[in-house]
Image (cartoon, helix red, strand yellow):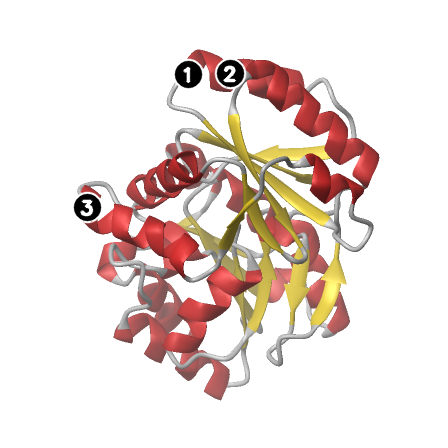
Amino acid sequence: MITLIATDMDGTLLNENQEISEANKQAILDAQQQGIEVVVATGRSYEEARYVIQEAGISCDIVCANGAEVRNKQGEIIYQAGIESARAKEIASVLKETGIYFEIYTDQGTYTENYEMGVELIVDIFTTANPGISEEQVRQSARERFEKGHIKLVDDYGVLFEDASKLVYKFLVFSFDDKQLALANEKLNELSGIAISSSGKENIEVNSLEAQKGVALEKLLKDRGLSGENAMAMGDNLNDMSMMKVVGRPVAMGNALDQVKEFCPFITSTNKEDGVAKAIQEVIQQPAK
């Protein structure tokens, strides 16, 4: 019997309009009514994730920034796994040497040195999750990140590393240049103590080894006295793989990468077709054993 359900956001829980559909919302509420824990696990910051989830009328734990932060239903931080300042400086230095664009996620918000590239990065993530969506629609959503204060401009990332009150959660790296992206990935892989994943075809995500969706999910399961064997996780991209490896029922979205589909014994419909709702209804309608 499934006792906990974890779902990714972009390309999974969210449809092409970056919204939680009525069907997905109802399925989550039905699961919660049956006593099943529901967790949203995302690469987004808490503020970016919370806004969409609350708009849909859902209350649940949220794993943010790929597992660098976990918040309970009340919005309280119950787990953090940041990148220590010296290592963050080293990562930034490597990325600066390649000339590639990157953003920095912290416990006090997300920062960029370049507004235009910040918009392009989110356009890439959204269009990767939703092929065929209107580019202007996506760009408007990307610009809203700045308008709503979900991302902040700084002149120099160095001020973040020198501020002892800020904990660095994640580096989100982006480029349309395959060679530049490959070089950045190669250089990052020479560093120890970091987890490297991706949530889009032109990006790289860098976290602490302790900041992965799977690590955070394991901690939540342990805290609640639940077994991973009785948990389900749904996702579409590489940064979802770590949590799929710790559950008994890993489910790939119909729009997931081939690598994710090859790993998962269960495949649901796409995010445009309420795949999350269908996967949830399938397990909550199963007779108890």
> What amino acid does circle 1 point to?
Asp
Q: Nearer the viewer, residue 262 or 233?
A: 233
User: Which quadrant would the N terminus be assigned to in this image?
Assistant: bottom right
Q: Nearer the viewer, residue 50 or 152?
A: 152
Q: Residue furthest bottom?
A: 33
Q: Are marks 1 and 2 in contact (CB under 8 Å)?
A: yes
Choose top left, top right, bottom left or bottom right for residue 96: top right
Tag shown at residue 136? 3
Residue 151 spot, x, y in % from top left: 50, 52
Dot placed on the residue nearer the N-terminal end, 2 or 3:
3
Tag shown at residue 182? 2
Mark 1 closeness class: few <14, some 14–19, many ≥20 residues within 10 Å = few
Seen at 28% across and 73% down, the residue is 23
> What amino acid does circle 3 point to?
Glu
Choose top left, top right, bottom left or bottom right for residue 218: bottom right
How far apart in space, not on screen, are marks 1 and 2 (Cα)?
A: 6 Å
Tag shown at residue 105? none
Seen at 46% across and 45% down, the residue is 264
Judge whether residue 187 can be spotted in this image.
Answer: yes
Determine which residue is flagged by label 1: 178
